[in-house]
Image (cartoon, rainbow, N blue to C red):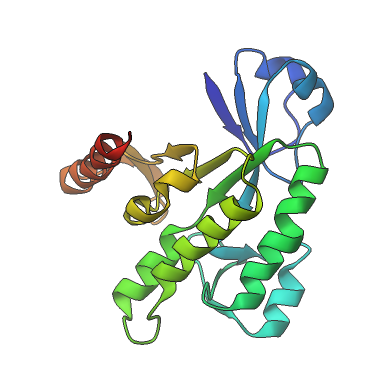
Amino acid sequence: PWVVYYADKAPLDAFGPYGLVVLDSESHPSLQPLRAQGKTLLGYISLGEVEQHRSWYAKVRQWGILKDENPDWKGSYAVDMRDSRWSNLVIETLVPMILARGFHGIFLDTLDNPIHLESVEPQKNKGMTKAAARLVRAIRQRFPNMPIMMNRAYQLLPVVERDIDIELGESIYADYDFGKTVYRRVNMADYEQQVRWLKAAKIRQP
């Protein structure tokens, strides 16, 4: 059993049933007691967006590589994955910082962003998808024994599936409608496409 929790309020005994725990890399319960219980702890990192409340936001904003704000998550901005400064920051600073806090590995989020940006504006965002895959592979090369879990970004799987340990299929059956502020079932076409991607990835495994 596993759980994802992005806050620091839950008591430690709430994590008792879970062997794999994904937490926010900055706002989280005490990690040492969870480590002592033998749990695998993964720290959240957003690779396709930079959130305004993160300590590295100002640096990335100054570089001029942030794109549009996510309309559903105010204060979170898409980042140009092609810029080597972002890749270097992730590999040289952000991942080591997460590990230094006591996490065993990382949970990669928002990698659907570069795929989406390139699909809607192919010329302007040419190479974003390849850059995203390149960063995932570079993280694995730098940290060969670190557990890596990736959220969605199914189109990257043929390239990076050997470089991650776990693929999370978030919102396969249901998703949140930000416009109507309600949860809703994913439409059948989207559901079936996600299942095809995941089944294809499973078949490819040795």
Which residue shows up at 72% across the image and 69% down it?
Answer: 57
Q: Report which quarter residue 100 is drawn in.
A: top right
29 left or right, relative to 181: right
Comparing 119 with 144, the one in front is 144
Q: Residue 111: image x %, image y %?
A: 47, 58
Q: Is residue 42 visible?
A: yes
**Can you say whether 144 is above or below 2 in the image?**
below
Q: Is residue 46 visible?
A: no
- Picture mark count: 0
Q: Please name the residue shown 32% across and 39% down the image.
A: 172
The location of residue 152, given as percent across then percent down, is 40, 48
Q: Nearer the viewer, residue 87 or 58?
A: 87
Q: Is residue 172 above or below residue 48?
A: above
Which residue is at 61% across, 76% downward?
84
The structure residue drawn at horizontal position 73% and vertical position 57%, both measured from the top left corner, is 94
Please state the horizontal and vertical placement of residue 13, each as a whole percent of the image: 73, 14
Return the residue nearer the eye: 17 or 182. Answer: 17
Query: 181 left or right of 30?
Result: left
The quadrant in which the C terminus is found is: top left
Does residue 56 lie above or below 110 as drawn?
A: below
On the image, which quarter does residue 147 sit in? top right
